[in-house]
């Protein structure tokens, strides 16, 4: 099974890890807590959010904005468009959407449940391994669903993330273990990766939409 604890964008992850270290040491975190933004219609106000610790709320605000951009791109696509593949080696938009849900699910298990990567039970692996790994099995099995199916899966997983984030504090988000490239990696970096991973696939979705048959 492909190990997403070692993603291919190593240089990017390395840089984001350094950025996170910088955030930990920067004097700003020792200042008074900024006022949290209410969660209503403030998608473009990146920063602390009501109901969350300062760092977790700020992270969640970036994830919320990124998710809104993805949903905006795909919400009107037909089943045929969701199943479209550029060639026999490419992934469909539908498969990528389910892949995003799978990625978030596995980072939940790793960070919230403190499970070693890949140690999920059989039931979890049966549901999520195919969309996580994609490839031939993904192209074979992830098809025939409409957009409501994919959006429901994304929303279901995100609801868990939001609830679990609310239970935790900034000490937790800075907690680290050996992870990316077997180097110290904190929970902030792991969840930042979930967000930038979604951004990466958002770009692929844009590319595929531009290749739809007329």
Image (cartoon, rainbow, N blue to C red):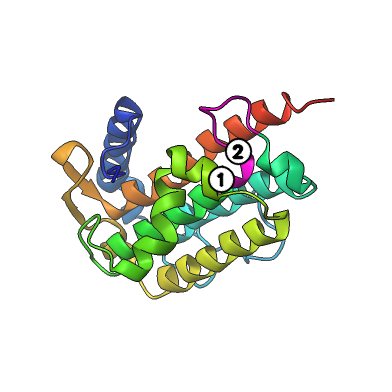
Q: Is residue 54 left or right of residue 13?
A: right
Q: Position of residue 170 (x, y in %)?
A: 32, 62
- Report the residue marked by disc 2: 92
| Residue at 32% across, 36% down | 7
| Residue occupying the far right of the picture | 214
Q: Secondary structure at mark 2?
A: loop
Q: Is residue 22 left or right of residue 92?
A: left
Q: Are marks 1 and 2 in contact (CB under 8 Å)?
A: yes
Magenta span main SS: loop
| Front residue (pair 91, 170) | 91
Q: Secondary structure at mark 1?
A: helix
| Residue at 74% across, 39% down | 81
| Numbered circle sitting on residue 148 | none
| Numbered circle sitting on residue 95 | 1
Image: magenta residue range: 85-96
Q: Position of residue 86 (x, y in %)?
A: 63, 26
Give the vertical position of 39 relative to 213 (above or below). below
């Amino acid at each position: 099974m492909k190990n997403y604890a070692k993603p291919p964008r190593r240089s990017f992850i390395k840089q984001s890890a350094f950025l996170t270290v910088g955030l930990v040491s920067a004097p700003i975190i020792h200042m008074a807590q900024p006022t949290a933004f209410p969660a209503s219609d403030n998608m473009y106000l990146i920063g602390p959010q009501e109901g969350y610790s300062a760092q977790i709320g700020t992270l969640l605000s970036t994830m919320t904005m990124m998710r809104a951009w993805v949903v905006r791109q795909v919400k009107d696509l037909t089943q045929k468009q969701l199943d479209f593949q550029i060639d026999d080696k490419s992934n469909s938009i539908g498969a990528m959407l389910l892949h995003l849900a799978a990625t978030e699910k596995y980072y939940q298990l790793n960070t919230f449940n403190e499970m070693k990567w890949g140690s999920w039970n059989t039931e979890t692996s049966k549901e999520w391994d195919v969309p996580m790994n994609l490839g031939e099995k993904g192209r074979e099995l992830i098809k025939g669903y409409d957009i409501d199916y994919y959006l429901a899966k994304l929303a279901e997983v995100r609801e868990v993330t939001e609830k679990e984030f609310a239970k935790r504090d900034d000490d937790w988000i800075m907690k680290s273990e050996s992870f990316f490239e077997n180097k110290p990696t904190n929970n902030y970096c792991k969840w930042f990766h979930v967000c930038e991973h979604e951004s990466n696939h958002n770009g692929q979705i844009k590319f595929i939409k531009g290749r739809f048959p007329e």
